Image (spheres, grey):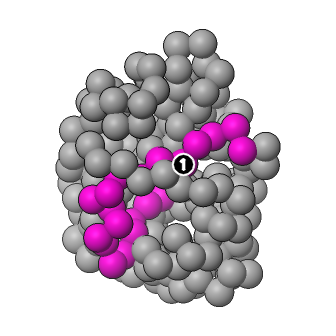
Amino acid sequence: MIKVSEVKTANPENYKTDLQKQVYENLNALEIPFERVDNEPAVTMDDCVAIDERLNVKTVKTLLLCNRQKTAFYLFITAGDKPFVTKDFSKALGVSRVSFAPPELLFDMLGVEVGATTVLSLFLDSHNDIRLVIDNDIMSYEYFGCTDSTTTGYMRIKLSDLIEKYIPFTNHIPTCIEV
């Protein structure tokens, strides 16, 4: 099990990336309170067990998906313990089959590496090339657990703050689906 710090409510003293700094600046500017932890690198949902326990939250699974031609992109947020089935996703959204976007596109579009994908970096998609898709199961959560754009920082924010403040700030409109 990975090591996880005590819960903190202030920005990190030192940022690992410019994106991480911008994420916290955005949260502060939007007056969105958060609780966060520092941790050893967490890349898989199994790595997040200790994080979830410390933050008392269910970390979501956030996936950047694309069609075969890499012309349509989807940021899909689903429950961390829910298996992802491309056929079910495609059917629910009424699109052709999708696959995981390659790591270089993940970095180019959202500024993150594999394991650090987060809706909080969606503000980088200023041309709205990425369609935000949220699993209906997430909409019942009170709190939303996700990375701060690194594999070594996770946070908990109110889902209502994410939906009502942060996502509108990114100029995206979420599509909710049942999978």
Q: Indicate whether 101 appears above or below 43.
A: above
Q: Which quadrant of the view contains residue 32?
A: bottom right
Q: Which residues are magenta?
A: 128-147
> Residue at 68% across / 81% down in the picture?
30
Q: Position of residue 88 (x, y in %)?
A: 28, 31
Residue bearing mark 1: 132
Q: Position of residue 54 (x, y in %)?
A: 28, 74
Q: Position of residue 145 (x, y in %)?
A: 39, 66
> Residue at 52% across / 79% down in the picture?
161
Dot 1 alpha-carbon crowd within 10 angstroms: few under 14, some 14 to 19, many 20 or more: many
Say what secondary structure mark 1 lies in: strand
> Residue at 43% across / 61% down in the picture?
146
Q: Position of residue 167 (x, y in %)?
A: 61, 64
In which quadrant will I find the C terminus?
top left
Q: In terms of depth relative to the viewer, which is nearer, 91 or 70?
A: 91
In which quadrant will I find the N terminus?
bottom left
Q: Which quadrant of the view contains residue 102?
A: top right
Q: Indicate whether 101 appears above or below 40.
A: above
Disc 1 marks a residue whose amino acid type is: Leu
Instruction: Reply yes or no: does residue 34 show up in magenta.
Output: no
Q: In terms of depth relative to the viewer, which is nearer, 140 or 61?
A: 140
Please give left or right for residue 52 compared with residue 32 in the image. left
On the question of residue 144 being in view, the answer is: yes
Please give left or right for residue 90 compared with residue 65 in the image. left
Furthest residue to the right? 127
On the question of residue 151 being in view, the answer is: no
